[in-house]
Amino acid sequence: MTIKWKATANSGAVYVVLRKLAGNNVFAQVGLVSSKKFIDATVPAGTTSCQYQVQAVRNNQASIASQPVSIQFGAGGASGYTGGQVGMAA
């Protein structure tokens, strides 16, 4: 799963990528990147849906997390997903 987003953060920002799997009540950190792109290779097989949020961090100050973006996988769950992009603002 490739996630891309737009951001207005100044240089030096890093981005925390959060994911909530179907059936879970909380988002968990799945990545920390300096680019505006993240490849999530850890979605468990059989997952039918999940949500992502992105949060910018610069000089130990964090933005609020983006609005959640929902992803629905096909009948085979995450193992059947072949790729794509999700746009979100952070």
Image (cartoon, rainbow, N blue to C red):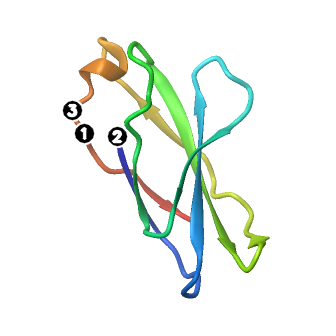
Image coordinates of residue 12 in percent, x first then y, are: 58, 83
Residue at 73% across / 32% down in the picture? 26
**What numbered label is drawn on residue 82?**
3
Residue at 39% across / 51% down in the picture? 86
- Distance CA(mark 1)–CA(mark 3): 4 Å
Which residue corresponds to mark 1? 83
Q: Amino acid at mark 2?
A: Met
Image coordinates of residue 22 in percent, x first then y, are: 58, 21
First in residue order: circle 1 vs circle 2: 2
Q: Amino acid at mark 3?
A: Thr
Which residue corresponds to mark 2? 1
Tell me the crowding category of disc 3: few under 14, some 14 to 19, or many 20 or more residues within 10 angstroms, Cα based: few
**Does residue 5 appear left or right of residue 59 in this picture?**
left
Residue at 52% across / 30% down in the picture? 50
Image coordinates of residue 46 in percent, x first then y, are: 40, 13
**Image quarter for residue 90?**
bottom right
Image marks 1 and 3: residues in contact by CB distance under 8 Å: yes
Residue at 68% across / 22% down in the picture? 24
